[in-house]
Amino acid sequence: MRVLSKLETAILLIGGLLMVVGAGSAIFLQSWACYVFAPGALMFAAMQMRQRYDGPNFTIRRLRRIMLLSDALFLVAALLMIANSSNFFHINYLSYIKYVHNNWIVVLLVAALLQLYSNHRIANELEKDGKKN
């Protein structure tokens, strides 16, 4: 895996912290939560997309694609969180309740689980590769 620079690592950590603060404050119905979560998700996803793996291990490549899917889901969760605070899709109320209202929580949960799984497995696979060589 490509190692991030100190600045990129700082951006990744700040993005993750903003995501935690935004999601946590949304639980307490803070209106500004989505505007903290969205930049954090963008920073976090962008820095993870900058990490690359060019090695031959197919398992790590597959796990990397799962990680990129979870990054996309973080961005979708941010979009749904913003849509939850204001109906910018301009859809009727019943459709809004059915498709948008608080569904960002489900998307965020799926993204977090995929992220947790892929990060844990990638670390184990890289460790195995290091022991082989």
Image (cartoon, rainbow, N blue to C red):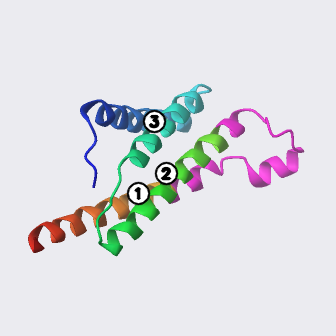
Front-most of residues 32 and 119: 119
Distance of label 2 from label 1 (alpha carbons): 8 Å
93 is higher (above) or lower (below) than 57: above
Q: For the N terminus, give its image quadrant.
A: bottom left
Residue 50 x %, y % = 39, 45
Front-most of residues 76 and 23: 76
Residue 48 x %, y % = 40, 47
- Residue 116 image-quadrant placement: bottom left
Q: Which mark is residue 48?
A: none
Whether residue 25 appears in this view of the structure is no
On the image, numbered disc 1 is attached to which residue?
A: 115
On the image, numbered disc 2 is attached to which residue?
A: 71
Q: Which mark is residue 43?
A: 3
Instruction: Please indicate whether residue 130 sits to the left or right of residue 66 in the image.
Output: left
Q: Magenta stretch?
A: 82-110
Residue 22 in magenta? Answer: no
Q: Residue at x 66, y 47 (%)?
A: 102
Instruction: Please indicate whether residue 102 sits to the left or right of residue 50 in the image.
Output: right
Whether residue 22 appears in this view of the structure is yes
Distance of label 2 from label 3 (alpha carbons): 10 Å
Secondary structure beneath label 3: helix
Q: Amino acid at mark 3?
A: Met
- Residue 11 image-quadrant placement: top left
Q: Amino acid at mark 1?
A: Gln
Q: For the C terminus, give its image quadrant.
A: bottom left
Of badges 2 and 1, nearer the viewer stands 2
Of badges 3 and 1, nearer the viewer stands 3
